[in-house]
Image: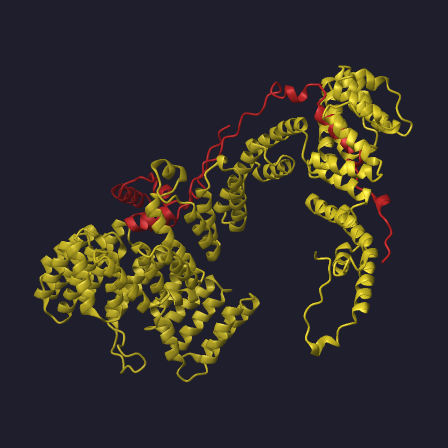
Chain colours: A yellow, B red
Amino acid sequence: MHLIYKPSAVSKKHKHQLPAPQSRTAALKQNGLRAFHQNKFTEAIQHWQHLDLIAEPALRAPLAEAYFRRALAATDLTARLDDLTRAIEIAPDDGRGWYHLGLARQRADRVPEAIAAYERARELGDGRATRLLALVQIESQSERLLADLPEADRIALQPVNALLRGDWSAVLDQAPLPTESAATINLWRGLALLAQGDLIAARDALAPLGKALRPGAEAVRATYHGLALWHTGDRAGALNEWQTAVTRTPAPRTLAPRLQAIVAAQRLQHIRTLIDQQQWATALKEIEAALALMPDQADLLKAQLIASHRLAQAAVAQQQWPVALERWQAMIAVLEKQSTLGVLTPLLYNLALTYEQNEQWAEAADVWDKLRGKLPPRPSAKSQAALQLPLPVPEFRVWLRKHVLECYKHAGNLEGAITSYRALIKTAPDDLDLRYEFAEALLSNAQDTAARNELQRILQKDENRTAARLLLAEIQLERGEMYDAEQHVRFAFEHDPNNSQARQAMSDVLAEQGNSRFDSGRFADAKKFYEEALKIAPDRAILLVWLGNTELAQQHRAEADRYFDAALSKATDLHDYVAVFRCWVEHDDQAAARTIIARATAAGFATEHFFVDLAGICFERSQPPSLIPFFTPAKKKPDEAWSKFGHEMLQRAEAVATDPAATLREIVALLGPTQPELAADYAQRLLKLTPDDPLVWLMQAVMHMLAGQIKQAKDAAKQAANLARKQNNPALLRDIEAFRQELNNPFASMLGELLVGNLDDDADEEWFR
Amino acid sequence: MKLPTLSPHSSNDPYAVLGIAHTASTEEVKKAYFALVRQHPPEKDPEAFKRIRAAYEQLRDPTQRQQTDLLRWQTWIEPELEPLPTEAALDPALAPVLDRADVIRAAQALSDLGRTDFREDFREVRV
């Protein structure tokens, strides 16, 4: 129907711009003809199919011819069948079209339909169809037609017929057609000789004669010549011939079952040798070549999985993430087709982790999501074990949802996560866990009000949702709604006293009350709150530290010692040691402070970070920072003893530093706001370690600026800009240039102070890393 | 053939660094850490200490440990390769007998089914 040209609706206004119908028809005809002669059959069809075939009957033959030629040029069998079908629809009396349709159908294993097409071709006078019809009948063991065939067809098909019936002598005795090639005659004779057991004669008859046979026939010859060679003792010759048989099997290269069995055994043996020698990359290449011939060979697929796995592991160990990604993906592709060869989930897991390592967060989120989709809704013990997950499915699902969110955050696509949560909630509005995660996502996206509303909705549906209540309290605390926050925490703790988060939050509330009493000098009240908090969270060493500090503030040294001792015996990280150290520094007791260092060293907490923290505390004690930046009255003289102690701590930090450059950066960031000149000295030393790092030059420039050394700051910033330019880092270069402009600002040193003062924040730390 | 499965990250695996099983209790983690710190004090062996410390940091807190466990590379059990076929197993394929399907395959390849060039079938067109 689409052959009939239907003029499109056009406005009167534009009608005059179109060619007259007659000239348009002529143009289409001529353009089509031009394309046809250039072998652009698709283009020719496009032109001609717009014309009305009823009005233009002479166009039927060219259009059919265009389809016919496009069909014969097609490598895709389906496309060829479609075009031939179209050709005979347009020109149903074209025997040639039917004949080729028969060939295409037979190639597609649609034999009954092929026979119908051949019969129609024969009716229409295409004599070639007779031989193909006879061949189909011979294949189905019917001899009826052979005698009725024209002589040429009968003689040509006789050897095939005889071989299929086991009549070897008929092949060997028959006089060949004068038109038959020597290679064809030898093939039939060789096969008959081999079948009757005369292997030496078969070997000679089947020996190659150049490329005289068509590929498919050549593959059969080489296969059987290989067999004859094998059985007459020439195994190397046989292997060569089987290789020839593989290469001469026409595309799509589907090997004959016999050949496939032989080649698979041969290839597998070689591959196994490579695997035994741990030559994974070479093995994989061989496997992939073999799989191109035998795509479903189970042992090859297993070998492919093993080699890929080893290569993925090696790539991960060497942090070659793109290589690892490629391998995990290849393995997943295999298992998605052949699930019996292994468990998919650990591979998806590793693929997602590799994406994360390669900082492809969006891709990681997609893979985690895919993994989530593989989890059964109600896992049995058996399905849980089969998945090989690190957590039971329900817990894993919760973790996974959160982790996907993290990935979205890294990818800067929290909106994507929120959209997906909204869709999930629509399908399961009563899933309060899901709603809670949605609230977390909103919070991560700085939508505090929406998060608070969502959490309140959860609590309306179930007031015992402790996590939701605590998160709501956290939001309220952030907004300064202290009373409401405390009420929620108390409710959560009273209703769910065994919930560790509720206990922690309750102890935080009590500790905060204690701190506020301590700050106003009400030590006895402070102690009561700390003790109450400790009852709830007895493992929190920091509460013992604060209790000790309360005693110290009241000059109860022995009690303080006992609390500190108890705190440090519970301490699980260096911060508790740092906290006790701070208490002694505030109490101006260097000897006691040193005992804490000794104890931390014995416990294995005396890292470079520990000493840098201690140095910071000492310098603070030596010269407390101004509470109002920029507008500080004249600074009082530093306390030399604590200043000296601070320097000693810096030396010790450098002595134990495992990454000297990182430690120097930490020291520069520590000293910058209060002692910029000293910080500039450390930055100078850092530059000696990393002279080509533009960020370190920038850091040096900031330190000079803070010290009021504007000229040196400009020089260092210029050097930073040169290096960033040289290293093709435009983002950093933009930052540096912005900083250089700021250097001309009369308040430059204040800006620098702001910059360095925020170095503890992750974002700025990242900038300096 | 059974191939050994490798742990790709043994050098980064906190359990491997502390020499403990993945099922080790918190107490066992702590014990292993302190024993290793005594062997590798930071002043004498800072590199080793750094690794030990980092491993302990990942495992000492249950939440952190769970996170560590969840972000560990997963072990994938490789399939076992079947034993290579013996020559006897290949006997059917190597037997010098004629396969009907191969005769048909050759006959088809020698017929028009094996041809690709049919230029003589093309016709001139006129419009």
User: Residue A99's image quarter?
Assistant: top right
Q: Is residue A507 visible?
A: no
Q: Nearer the viewer, residue A669 or A401?
A: A401
- The relative height of residue A143 versus residue A665 in the rendered view (above or below) is above
Q: Nearer the viewer, residue A8 or A454?
A: A8
- The relative height of residue B98 versus residue A580 in the rendered view (above or below) is above
What is the x, y in percent for residue A468? 26, 59
What is the x, y in percent for residue B24? 30, 40
Position of A270 with respect to A324 (left or right) is right
Extreme-right residue of the structure: A178
What is the x, y in percent for residue A610? 30, 58
Position of A529 with respect to A365 (left or right) is left
How many circles with numbers are drawn on the protein? 0
What is the x, y in percent for residue B93? 66, 22
User: Residue A677's image quarter?
Assistant: bottom left
Q: Nearer the viewer, residue B11 or A477?
A: A477
Image quadrant holding the C terminus of chain B, namely: bottom right
Extreme-front residue of the structure: A54
Extreme-bottom residue of the structure: A746
Q: Identify the residue shown where x is 21% and y is 56%.
A: A464
Q: Nearer the viewer, residue A198 or A308?
A: A198
Q: Is residue A133 visible?
A: yes
